[in-house]
Image: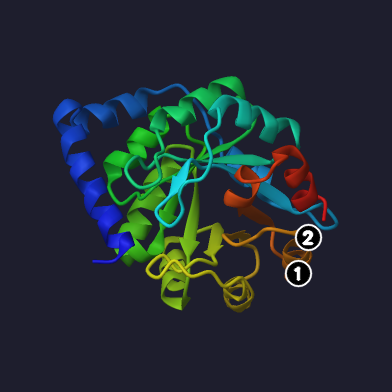
């Protein structure tokens, strides 16, 4: 069993336990009655117009399966730095067991910064998690195509949009791309990291970008650490970058954000 399968299996166990505390019917009812209007803010903020700087989604990331704990830091303080330094959106990893995330991180950050979109980055495959994301004040959620069937992609995408949230569809190969297009994705994130081997190759973005129809918002994820990467991505017509590790591990996260965003 590879790391991706282990994460998904652990997440299934967590959801099973959550449903014993709050049933599917109850969380659905709560979400449908929830007054917060995301209004597709994430899409609006990360779509890059001609001649604009690349859009930056800065990530709150405590740990990874590969590197363990990255750095001890205060979540609220780091989010303040992200916003004041010009990040266009904040990605929040909420997976608890392998990334040491916490769903409440989302709530806290959105409460402090209501005008910046927050992305829930987790391993989502159940409608329960979509309704939960709405209650956590998410503006968008991540859907990882490789852990979903084509039908699941479409069902979860349509449910998420019906609740006023956006979807960042994460792909790594042509099969994933086919799933995202079948679902109707308007934001496609190309992950340069192979989630099965954890190897990174930024050429993945360049290869798959050529196959994506015009009119989609394109996000490049993983392995982006400096100006040369960003400049090449801009040339290729990428709208946004999602960066976590290189910002978190930087001695000066504010300067790192400015370096990446205004390359």
Instruction: Indicate which label's residue lies in the foreground, 1 or 2.
Output: 2
Residues 78 and 182: in front is 78
Q: Residue at x 79, y 64 (%)?
A: 231
Q: Label 2: state its secondary structure.
A: helix
Q: Say if 71 sits above or below 105 in the image.
A: below
The answer to whether one can see residue 142 in this image is yes
Q: Residues within 10 Å of mark 1 (few under 14, many from 20)?
A: few
Q: Quadrant of the C terminus?
A: bottom right
Q: Residue at x 47, y 25 (%)?
A: 107
Q: Residue at x 74, y 38 (%)?
A: 254
Q: Say if 258 sits above or below 79 in the image.
A: below
Q: Label 1: state its secondary structure.
A: helix
Q: Which residue is mark 1?
A: 232
Query: Is residue 21 found left or right of 126 in the rendered image?
Result: left
* Marker disc for residue 227: 2
Number of marks in the rendered image: 2
Q: Residue at x 48, y 40 (%)?
A: 62
Residues 217 and 231: in front is 231
Residues 197 and 188: in front is 197
Q: Position of residue 89 (x, y in %)?
A: 63, 40
The answer to whether one can see residue 148 in this image is no
Q: Position of residue 22 (x, y in %)?
A: 20, 27
Q: Say if 223 sits above or below 209 in the image.
A: above
* Marker disc for residue 245: none
Q: Quadrant of the N terminus?
A: bottom left
Q: CA distance from mark 1 to mark 2?
A: 9 Å
Query: Is residue 104 found left or right of 29 in the rendered image?
Result: right
Q: Position of residue 135 (x, y in %)?
A: 39, 28
Residues 105 and 65: in front is 65
Q: If you read the primary sequence from the N terminus, does the residue marked by circle 1 or circle 2 appear first? A: 2
Q: Position of residue 137 (x, y in %)?
A: 47, 29
């Amino acid at each position: 069993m590879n790391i991706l399968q282990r994460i998904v299996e652990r997440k299934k166990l967590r959801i099973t336990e959550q449903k014993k505390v709050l049933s599917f019917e109850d969380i659905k009812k709560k979400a449908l009655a929830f007054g917060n209007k995301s209004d597709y803010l994430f899409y609006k903020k990360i779509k890059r117009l001609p001649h604009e700087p690349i859009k930056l989604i800065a990530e709150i990331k405590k740990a990874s399966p590969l590197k363990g704990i990255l750095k001890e830091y205060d979540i609220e303080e780091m989010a303040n730095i992200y916003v004041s330094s010009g990040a266009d959106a904040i990605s929040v990893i909420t997976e608890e067991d392998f990334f040491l995330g916490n769903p409440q991180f989302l709530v806290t950050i959105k409460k402090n910064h209501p005008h910046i979109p927050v992305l829930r980055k987790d391993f989502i495959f159940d409608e329960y998690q979509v309704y939960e994301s709405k209650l956590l004040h998410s503006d968008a959620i991540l859907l990882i195509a490789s852990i979903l069937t084509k039908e699941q992609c479409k069902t979860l995408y349509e449910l998420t949009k019906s609740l006023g949230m956006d979807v960042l569809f994460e792909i790594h190969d042509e099969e994933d791309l086919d799933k995202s297009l079948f679902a109707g994705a308007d934001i496609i994130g190309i992950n340069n990291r192979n989630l099965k081997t954890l190897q990174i190759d930024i050429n993945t973005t360049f290869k798959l970008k050529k196959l994506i129809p015009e009119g989609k918002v394109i996000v490049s994820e993983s392995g982006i650490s400096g100006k040369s990467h960003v400049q090449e991505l801009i040339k290729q017509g990428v709208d946004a970058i999602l960066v976590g590790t290189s910002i978190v591990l930087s001695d000066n996260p504010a300067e790192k954000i400015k370096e990446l965003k205004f390359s």
